[in-house]
Amino acid sequence: METPTVRVPLRGPYDLREVALMGFGHRDEDSFDGVMRLGFCVDGDYESQAGVGVRQEGEALTVTVEQFAGPPVDPERVTAQAARVVSADQDGQAYADLCRADPVLAPIFARAPGFRPANFYSPYEAAIWSIVSARRPRSQGIALRQRLAETYGTVLTVAGQPVPVVPTPSRLLEVDHLPGLPADRVPRLHAIAEAAQRGDLAVDRLTALEVDAAKTELQRLPGIGPFYSTLITVRACGLTDVLATEPQVLKHLKATYGRSVDAAELEQLAEAWRPWRTWVTVMLRALGGRADAGG
């Protein structure tokens, strides 16, 4: 398969370093050498895998498919998926304008104007993460996901470094045991593989549904409850305007206002943040405790 480099123009402030070092899901990088290394099962039937290097060149990203495994797919699909993962597929200028005009959001946004959410690679991979990471510290979930990828998936090379990629649905169905994974999780992983093969975990399908309908459908998968169904729907499909009430967000707002803010008041405040409520709440959680720029 040809491995082209595609240029993705950026709209609004953007800092790939901030995205790469955000720390989300299985990603836990503590340094950045100019390349954000991605390795994922490609949107569609998830039976192809791509190792992708993302670099920033001024007001654009370059997306290079550096290694590939499985049936060939359209490189544009790989590029579009990578752009969604790093939140480069949205009009960040409109988001920046909203934050700068809001007296509460403006000083937080100013701490890292180029920050945007990092997303899961796909609903399929977010569902896998939900199963392997449930009821365990995040560090253990990361180690278990890597073990699953190295044992049943593929290790691709991106910018000179190995990037483990979780197994495709057909390979996931072959998992019968994984050290550290409780036995009852194996049938749950198989159910995810079967759902992917039916097309139930396709991004286009889930985003075509109302958010609550998508979450209800995902909760039919064994092991996926309200929390994980929200995670999959919002943070794998790249939605920008779903409000999530999280303790860290309420904690930051309490510090800002000097009093407690409950979920009902947050919902009222967030009306002014449309259509960027997801991005705003992620920003509040990620940057709320960071010192002001230059401070």
Image (cartoon, helix red, strand yellow):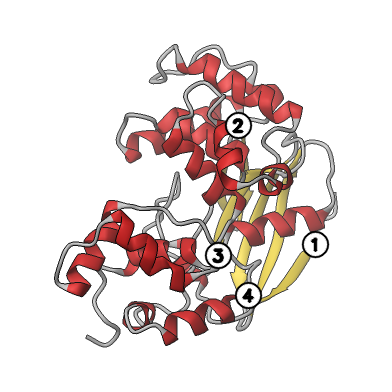
Instruction: Report x, y in % for residue 241.
Output: 53, 61
State the residue lying farthest toward the left.
258
Query: In the image, what residue type sits under mark 3?
Result: Val
- The residue at the point 42 percent across, 18 percent down is 179
Above or below — where is 84 with respect to 269? Answer: above
Q: CA distance from mark 1 to mark 4?
A: 25 Å
**What SS does tag 2 mark?**
helix
In the picture of the structure, the residue carrying the numbered disc 4 is 91
In front: label 2 or label 3: 2
Residue 192, by quadrant, is top right
Q: Return the residue at label 1.
A: 4
Q: CA distance from mark 2 to mark 4?
A: 29 Å
As drawn, is 44 to the left or to the right of 97?
Answer: right
Q: Which mark is residue 217?
A: 2
Which of discs 2 and 4 lies nearer the camera? The answer is: 2
Residue 247 can be seen, yes or no:
yes
Q: Are marks 2 and 3 in contact (CB under 8 Å)?
A: no
